[in-house]
Amino acid sequence: MRGRFISLEGGEGAGKSTQLKQLAQSLRARGLDVVETREPGGSRGAEAIRTLLLQGEQERWSPRAEALLFAAARADHVERLISPALERGQWVLCDRFLDSSIAYQGGAGGIGKDAIMELHRIGSCGLLPDRTLLLELPPEAAAARARQRDGGEADRIGARNARYHAKVAAAFAALAQAEADRFRRIDATGDADQVTERLIAAIADFL
């Protein structure tokens, strides 16, 4: 039986990385075989591209170049890790996936959803998660969490201004509304265990 593919999405500081680990622990306690991964990254080639994308000066890459690099990293990630794990019947939990490219480069970067989807069709055969969990947090709280997490040293995308990140949040909200069957919007306020309980509830139909 094919495994399940769950992505965690949201803006900077929403708690995706923490929640992915806690969700994985909870699923393993239920006897499931879980693979944890992230984007950009997750495979050797994609991790190399991650360094190119997240380091360096703000204007190192244009939105179009960013979109191409993310698509290339995702193609390698899907081929070498995600698809094989799903075929083995494992659950794959991914910190960011296609929807981040749509929100960041497509929305805030101005490229548009259609261009991102075409790159995804070519690079990753159009693979979509079975469920996308969108962690939502008020902007002030998200910014405070991101500062605490990064120690004032955000990567080149995270360090962009509040206007950019507001566009990202708006793009995520529009995606969740347009694809309500796949998305679940998760209140990311409160302590980590409370948020994990909300995530479990949002995938209860798969368990």
Image (cartoon, helix red, strand yellow):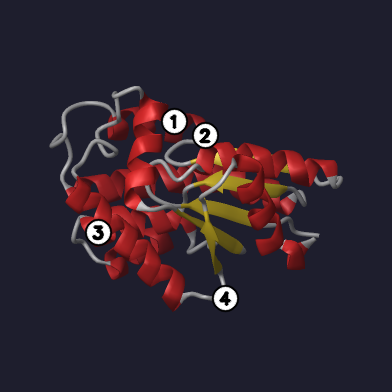
Callout 1–callout 2 Cβ contact below 8 Å: yes
Q: Which mark lies nearer to you, 3 or 1? A: 3
Q: Nearer the viewer, residue 150 or 34?
A: 150
- The kind of residue on which mark 1 rests is Glu
Sequence-first tag of 3 and 2: 2
Sequence-first tag of 3 and 1: 1
How far from the left and from the top, in percent, is residue 16?
51, 43
Marker disc for residue 47:
1
Helix, strand or loop at mark 2: loop
- The kind of residue on which mark 3 rests is Lys
- The kind of residue on which mark 2 rests is Ser
Sequence-first tag of 1 and 4: 1
**Residue that label 2 marks:** 43
Q: Which mark lies nearer to you, 3 or 2? A: 3
Marker disc for residue 167:
3
**Residue that label 4 marks:** 181
Helix, strand or loop at mark 1: helix
Query: Badge 4: few (under 14), some or many (20 or more) residues near its Cα, within 10 Å?
Result: few
